[in-house]
Amino acid sequence: MKHILFAFSLFLFSLSSCKKENAAATDDLYKDAPRSDMPAEIAPANWRYGSLSALGIYDNRGNHIANAQDALREYKVTSDGYVEFVQYLAVNSSNCYSMAYTHLKGTMKWEAPNKLTWTPVKGEFESRFTCSGTQSTRTATQADLDRSKSVWWYRLEDLTYSGTKDYLVLYTDPAMQSHHQEFAYKLIK
């Protein structure tokens, strides 16, 4: 139950505003990051992959194996190209949970017709291990931020056959072939 509360608190934290802070030091972080106004079809919005769930998975003897969902990735994008990224991952082993949380802030640049560049400028990582009771938090290094920078090509798709193109599908190649697909995020406006 503790990991569910932890995950839910992280999710609520992700709902905080991703607008650039007003402090001069923060301004310096964002000044060289590529940023542009975003198309109305993809911002302002949250793009979400996965979810958090209190529902469990049980074996045929009724033993709890894991929670139904232990992964969440979300980008919160503003119309003017500021972004907040949150990722929560948990692994269950013998009723012990190893949890990892990533929180990055940065910018996004849009180039016509469908290219996006995500540039994180600051962030932190947190790990928790329920059986040992240990927890660690560290600030993202420049190397971490550089590894997290991404360039994608996107297309809006109807993945649920609802008649609405409400999934943002990201590709690592401009040809947007399925073997270059990175993630499909549900658009939440």
Image: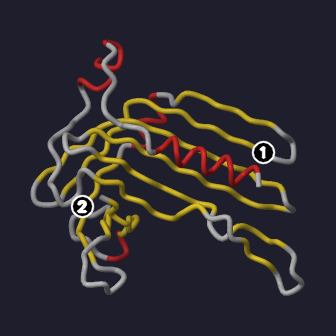
* Dot in front, 2 or 1: 1
Q: Position of residue 82 (x, y in %)?
A: 28, 38
Q: Is residue 128 left or right of residue 123?
A: right
Quarter placement of the N terminus: bottom right
Query: Across the whole image, how many numbered discs are drawn on residues?
Result: 2
Mark closer to the chain start, 2 or 1: 1
Find the distance from the CA under tag 2 to the CA under tag 1: 36 Å
Given residues 121 and 147, the one toward you in this image is 121
* Figure coloring: secondary structure
Tell me which residue sits at (29%, 79%) in the image: 158
Q: Is residue 40 left or right of residue 71?
A: left
Residue indicated by mark 1? 129
Residues marked 2 and 1 touching at CB (< 8 Å): no
Tell me which residue sits at (72%, 51%) in the image: 3
Q: Residues within 10 Å of mark 2 (few under 14, many from 20)?
A: many
Given residues 168 and 53, the one toward you in this image is 53
Tell me which residue sits at (57%, 45%) in the image: 10
Quarter placement of the C terminus: bottom left
Residue indicated by mark 2? 153
**Secondary structure found at label 1:** strand
Q: Quadrant of residue 176?
A: bottom left
Q: Is residue 62 left or right of residue 4?
A: right
**Secondary structure found at label 2:** strand
Q: Position of residue 85 (x, y in %)?
A: 43, 45
Tell me which residue sits at (76%, 49%) in the image: 2
Q: Position of residue 143 (x, y in %)?
A: 47, 32
